[in-house]
Image (cartoon, rainbow, N blue to C red):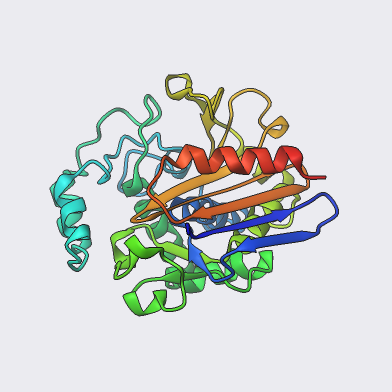
């Protein structure tokens, strides 16, 4: 039997959960968490959204929108080989050197390429601005304000005790996710997105800036017919609030998607390595059918 967890929050706030009740890895849904944390620091004046980061050629907004010109480690074969072999994560310096991150692939703002390295830079900005570990910063800036009781940052294998990773994810070291790996229940992933769109987490003007997006027509498919990327959000290029907004993620042995539309939110985690778009399709259908 396939392991999965499905959480739906309908218009009146009723939460329905089926399948796995334990926390699960949020994979790249963590990017939305990081974006919210960074934007709350922008609201506090601790970070700037549009000024170049000290010592860098790009801005925080460009990092959050994957427009900074940085590479990604997702296509590095040795990285995946070492993950599968159960080896310890590389030191950050080795990772950055292997990818030659000082050489930008395009002028910031003039291109788009999904980059986990970019979100490692976001993590570093959050930790520097707060003087806290990522776990402490996210708890203060996101988890507690959103009322998430199960969300936490996993940094060591022991942090995944009690987290349902799926059979293929057993023994995984969360340090391989260099921007940080949030774990939590599917219900809390749905609560995160609902809190974002209903104004619990960000001021209206800040949320509006999060929706400033780059259209990605070259990535159009049956699931994302009008794709765009905002600040840590996957959304529609035209009238984004008329469509679900959120993020998907995938890692060894499982996929997850968490999206919200209006007052409704849904998260689905599935223990398989299937195309993440199939999990997104399920989320979209649940949101469309929910009362």
Q: Which residue is drawn at the image coordinates 35% and 33% (left, top)? A: 113
x and y percentages locating residue 213 in the rendered image: 55, 31
Which of these two is toward me, 59 or 133? 133
Dividing the picture into quarters, in which one does residue 254 lie? bottom left
Left or right: 232 in relation to 181: right
Dividing the picture into quarters, in which one does residue 244 lie? top right
Q: Which residue is drawn at the image coordinates 19% and 44% (left, top)? A: 76
Left or right: 92 in relation to 133: left
x and y percentages locating residue 159 in the rendered image: 40, 77
Q: Is residue 76 above or below residue 253?
A: above
Report the number of discs: 0
Which of these two is toward me, 155 or 255? 255
- Furthest-top residue in this view: 217
Q: Is residue 267 above or below residue 151?
A: above
x and y percentages locating residue 271 in the rendered image: 44, 56
x and y percentages locating residue 114 in the rendered image: 37, 38
């Amino acid at each position: 039997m396939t392991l999965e967890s499905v959480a739906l929050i309908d218009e009146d706030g009723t939460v329905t959960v089926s399948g796995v009740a334990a926390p699960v890895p949020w994979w790249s849904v963590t990017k939305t968490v990081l974006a919210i944390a960074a934007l709350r620091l922008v609201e506090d004046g601790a970070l700037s959204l549009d000024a170049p980061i000290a010592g860098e050629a790009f801005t925080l907004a460009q990092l959050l929108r994957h427009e900074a010109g940085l590479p990604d480690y997702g296509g590095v074969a040795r990285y995946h080989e070492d993950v599968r072999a159960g080896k310890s994560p590389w030191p950050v310096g080795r990772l950055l050197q292997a990818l030659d991150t000082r050489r930008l692939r395009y002028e910031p703002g003039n291109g788009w390429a999904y980059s986990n390295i970019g979100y490692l830079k976001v993590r570093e900005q959050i930790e520097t601005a707060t003087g806290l570990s990522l776990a402490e910063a996210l708890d203060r800036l996101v988890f507690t304000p959103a009322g998430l009781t199960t969300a936490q940052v996993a940094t060591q294998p022991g942090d995944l005790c009690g987290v349902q990773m799926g059979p293929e994810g057993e023994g995984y070291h969360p340090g391989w996710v260099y921007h940080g790996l949030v774990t939590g229940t599917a219900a809390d992933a749905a609560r995160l997105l609902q809190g974002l769109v209903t104004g619990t987490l960000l001021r209206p003007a800040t949320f509006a800036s999060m929706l400033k997006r780059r259209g990605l027509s070259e990535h159009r498919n049956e699931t994302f017919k009008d794709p765009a990327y905002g600040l840590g959000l996957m959304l529609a290029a035209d009238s984004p609030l008329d469509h679900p907004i959120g993020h998907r993620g995938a890692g060894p042995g499982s996929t997850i998607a968490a999206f919200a539309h209006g007052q409704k939110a849904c998260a689905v985690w599935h223990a398989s390595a299937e195309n993440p778009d199939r999990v997104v399709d399920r989320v979209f259908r649940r949101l469309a059918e929910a009362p």
